[in-house]
C-alpha cells in the first residue's frame, strides 16, 4: 500500500485507539453533568436577577448575574474534566502559563476589567442615567466589565471602553432630582439692566418647566463697549431639563421683541486682505 492510502488508514486507527481507551461510563456521566449543569446555572442566575430587580441597582443586578454565570460555568467545566480523568494540577499549571501570556497580549482588556471593577464599587452612574463623556451625551444602556454602552440622543449606540471613562471627565446629568440650565443672554449696552433682569425673572416665573425654588440665578457677567452679557440660570426637574432647554431661548426672543429689548447683532469682520488677481 502506498503512502497516499496509508495516511487515512493510520488516522482512522489513531481515532479508534482513542475510542478504545475512553471510559464510556465517565463520558456519559460528564455529558449528563453538562446537559443538566449549564441550564441550571442560567436558570439560577435568572432567578437571582429577578429577586434583585427591585432591591439593587440595575448595574449591581447585571454584575451578580454575570458572576453567577461565570463562576457556575467554571465549576461545571472543572467537574466535567475531573470526571473524564483530566489531572486538575496539570490543567491549573497550564492555565497559569496561558494567563501570563494573555496578560501581556491583552493589557488593554485587563485595564478595562480593572477599571470596570472600580466603577462597580464607586458607582459614578447606573443603567438608565444620562451621562456626558468626552462631550458625548446619552443614556447608559449597559455597564460591562470591558466597556459602557450608551444610547445617544439620535438613537445610535456608543461603546466607551472603561479605561477611557477612567481618564475622561464624566458628568452624570440625571444623578440629582433637579438641575440648572445656564444660558448667556446678550443685550445692547444702553439697555436698562434692571429692567432686562426683571423681564428675565418674569420669563422664568411663567415657564411651565421652571422651579420657584431654588431661585432663578440672574447676574451681570461681562460689561463690554457694545453689549452686556447676563448669566441666566433657571432651575428645573431633571426630567424636564431638555424640554426647558428647547423652549426657553424662543421665549426670551419673543418677550424681548415684545418689550423692545434689543439683542446686538454679531459683528462679522470684513476681509481686508489683498484682492485676488484676475
Image (cartoon, helix red, strand yellow):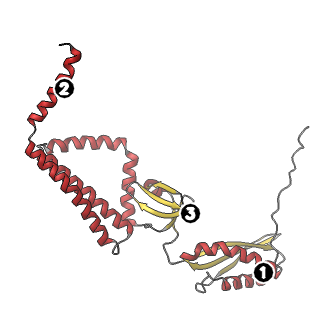
Height in image: 211 above or below 264?
Answer: below
Number of residues whose C-alpha sits closer than 10 Å to that of mark 2, classed few (under 14), some (14–19) or many (20 or more): few
Point 21% across, 20% down: residue: 7
Give yes or no for contact between labels 2 and 3 (Cβ–Cβ under 8 Å).
no
Residue located farthest toward the top when viewing the structure as drawn: 2
The local secondary structure at tag 3 comes to loop
The residue nearer to you, when weighing 146 against 141, is: 141
Residue 32 shown left or right of residue 49 in the figure: left
Please tell me which of labels 1 and 3 falls first in the chain.
Answer: 3
Number of residues whose C-alpha sits closer than 10 Å to that of mark 3, classed few (under 14), some (14–19) or many (20 or more): few
The local secondary structure at tag 2 comes to helix
Q: Position of residue 90 (x, y in %)?
A: 16, 41
Please tell me which of labels 1 and 2 falls first in the chain.
Answer: 2
Q: Position of residue 97 (x, y in %)?
A: 25, 40
Between the C-alphas of marks 1 and 3, the distance is: 37 Å
Q: Which mark is residue 11?
A: 2
The residue nearer to you, when weighing 108 against 64, is: 64
Residue 160 shown left or right of residue 83 in the figure: right
Point 49% across, 76% down: residue: 176
Residue of label 3: 153
Between the C-alphas of marks 1 and 2, the distance is: 94 Å
Q: Position of residue 73 (x, y in %)?
A: 23, 54
Point 32% across, 42% down: residue: 102
| Quarter of the rendering containing residue 113 | bottom left
Residue of label 1: 193
Amino acid at each position: 500500500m502506498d503512502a497516499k492510502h496509508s495516511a487515512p488508514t493510520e488516522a482512522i486507527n489513531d481515532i479508534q485507539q482513542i475510542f478504545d481507551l475512553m471510559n464510556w461510563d465517565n463520558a456519559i456521566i460528564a455529558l449528563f453533568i453538562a446537559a443538566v449543569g449549564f441550564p441550571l446555572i442560567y436558570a439560577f442566575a435568572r432567578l437571582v436577577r429577578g429577586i434583585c430587580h427591585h432591591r439593587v441597582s440595575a448595574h449591581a443586578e447585571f454584575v451578580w448575574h454575570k458572576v453567577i454565570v461565570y463562576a457556575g460555568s467554571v465549576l461545571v467545566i472543572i467537574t466535567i474534566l475531573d470526571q473524564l480523568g483530566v489531572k486538575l494540577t496539570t490543567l491549573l499549571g497550564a492555565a497559569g502559563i496561558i494567563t501570563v501570556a494573555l496578560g501581556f497580549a491583552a493589557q488593554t482588556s485587563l485595564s478595562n476589567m480593572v477599571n470596570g471593577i472600580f466603577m462597580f464599587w464607586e458607582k459614578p452612574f447606573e443603567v438608565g442615567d444620562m451621562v456626558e463623556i468626552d462631550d458625548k451625551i446619552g443614556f447608559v444602556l449597559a455597564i460591562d466589565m470591558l466597556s459602557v454602552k450608551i444610547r445617544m440622543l439620535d438613537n445610535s449606540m456608543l461603546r466607551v471602553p472603561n479605561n477611557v471613562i477612567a481618564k475622561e471627565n464624566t458628568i452624570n446629568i440625571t444623578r440629582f432630582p433637579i438641575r440648572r440650565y445656564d444660558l448667556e443672554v446678550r443685550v445692547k449696552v444702553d439697555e436698562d439692566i434692571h429692567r432686562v433682569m426683571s423681564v428675565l425673572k418674569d420669563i422664568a416665573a411663567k415657564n411651565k418647566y421652571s422651579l420657584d425654588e431654588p431661585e432663578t440665578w440672574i447676574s451681570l457677567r461681562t460689561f463690554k463697549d457694545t453689549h452686556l452679557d447676563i448669566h441666566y440660570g433657571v432651575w428645573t426637574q431633571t426630567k424636564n431639563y431638555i424640554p426647558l432647554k428647547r423652549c426657553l431661548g424662543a421665549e426670551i426672543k419673543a418677550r424681548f421683541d415684545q418689550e423692545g429689548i434689543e439683542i446686538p447683532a454679531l459683528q462679522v469682520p470684513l476681509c481686508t486682505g489683498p484682492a485676488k488677481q484676475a
